[in-house]
Amino acid sequence: MATAAFDLIVLGAGSGGIAGAIRAARHGARVAILEPHALGGTCVNVGCVPKKAMWLAAELAEAQQLAGELGFNGQSVALDWPAFIARRQQYISNIHASYRKRFDELGISVIAERGELLGNGRVHAGTQDLSATHVLIATGGHARRPDITGNEHGIDSDGFFGLRAAPRKVAVIGAGYIAVELAGVLRALGSEVHLLVRGERLLRPFDHDIGDALREAMQTRGIDIVFGHELDQVSRDADGIRVHCRNGDVAGGFDCLLWAVGRSPNVTGIGLDAASVALDGQGFIAVDEWQNTSAKNVYAVGDVTDCPALTPVAIAAARRLMDRVFGGKPKARLDYRNIPSVVFAHPPIGSIGLTEAQARAAHGDAVTIYRSRFRPMLGALAGHAERSLMKLVCVGDDERVLGIHLLGPGSDEILQGFAVAVKMGACKRDFDDTVAIHPTAAEELVLMG
């Protein structure tokens, strides 16, 4: 059997894999990309894209209620889930078509098979063997389920996108961004939502003020949050799903249980041992700052590594890697410092840089904190008490801004521009010297005294 030869073979056509394949091909490399499932990976099919679509639907549901409070007389209309999902899936199909068009234009070979490393640049794919000078592993990750009795009674985040109506009563297990995002969407679309949290705080890696403010906002929206919930097992009876806590408490009557307890890398069955590709202590593919694995000319990007699990991170890392390997830029690599992130909760969250706790651990008394709590104008017009939060973490005599943390309407869009300022090394005086845009929420960031 003849072996097809390429300059680059990519395992996985998620965001990172596709970005790497396209950038390499644009540099003139002969590229093959292997993907047994839908193009776009988690982000396009069961992640960022459909999640944002559902969040937008939830935003419209909340906006209808707010409009009524402000004097609009139209009756609120419930979401037609099948019709909306048809639009959502058509949007995703358009993305698939766009990928296929670019692959065709660039001469990228797309092989709808799972790739298995054989070592020395060889890869097995279905009934054929391939070879390449360079191999990129971008196989992504998958949703985890806890190893407890009855875990089959719940759905994970993939299953969420299979819903065709809002569950009447749902238990969400988790405290991370997936848990709070999907809990917020379901509540806005009409579900009774119970969020069961093992620890004592939401969004633990984020600034604590953000987690506390989100808890208040979610509870105001009617989400029941139970902290310190040590899950024991799950069962089902005639009344629905029952969630058993280790202290003996039982919550029942759920017609949906959603696991949001984290994700694991897709590292099994892809030939890592044969290619001498090592894992780290957490089970991710170990990479250095250049995306190199332990095997020569084998690289990894995205959720299969222990790098920030964000689509733009995987894309940026893959593009810089290919600029280095094929584009004549030997120093090209991603700077993982000060990466902005957004949580599409209700309300949304934006964050970049150090939290207050991290800054104080590193810089002690040199840290200065600025906060603003205010009622956004639209909510205030309706008489709502909910307040947005904006927080600056500054360090040193020049008060360099090392962290920005936002919660409130528009935070997802506001952060992008301010992230550029942080990346450029802006100080508090640079914010002070910037004239505010009034009346906006964003102006609070340049008016803090």
Image (tube, grey):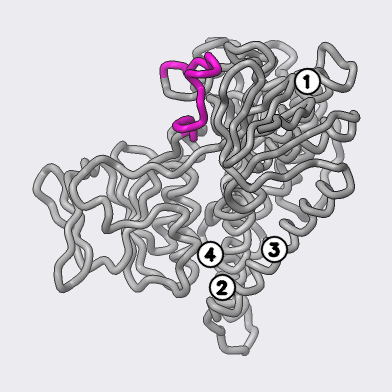
Mark 2 or mark 4, whichever is nearer to me:
2
Mark 4 or mark 1, whichever is nearer to me:
1
Q: Secondary structure at mark 1?
A: loop
Give the amino acid at mark 1. Gly
Give the residue displayed 50% in from the left and 62% down from the top: 161
Give the residue displayed 61% in from the left and 71% down from the top: 60
Cα separation, mark 2 vs mark 4, equals 17 Å
Task: Give the overall secondary structure of the magenta segment.
Answer: loop
Q: Which mark is residue 93?
A: 3
* Quadrant placement of the C terminus: top right
Horizontal side of 32 relative to 384 (left or right) equals right
Give the residue displayed 59% in from the left and 24% down from the top: 354
Give the amino acid at mark 2. Ala
Residue 313 seen anywhere in this rendered image of the structure: no
Cα separation, mark 3 vs mark 4, equals 39 Å
Category of crowding for the residue at label 1, using alpha-carbon neighbours closer than 10 angstroms: few (below 14), some (14–19), many (at least 20): few
For marks 1 and 3 on the same chain, the one whose residue lies earlier in the sequence:
3
Q: Are marks 3 and 2 in contact (CB under 8 Å)?
A: no
For marks 3 and 2 on the same chain, the one whose residue lies earlier in the sequence:
2
Q: In the picture shown, does residue 253 fall above or below 283?
A: below
* Residue highlighted by disc 1: 425
Q: Secondary structure at mark 4?
A: loop
* Residue highlighted by disc 2: 61
Could you say which is closer to the camera, residue 115 or residue 246? 115
Give the amino acid at mark 4. His
Q: Which mark is residue 384?
A: 4
- Quarter of the image holding residue 34? top right
Mark 1 or mark 3, whichever is nearer to me:
3
Could you say which is closer to the camera, residue 140 or residue 67? 140
Q: Position of residue 356 (x, y in %)?
A: 53, 24
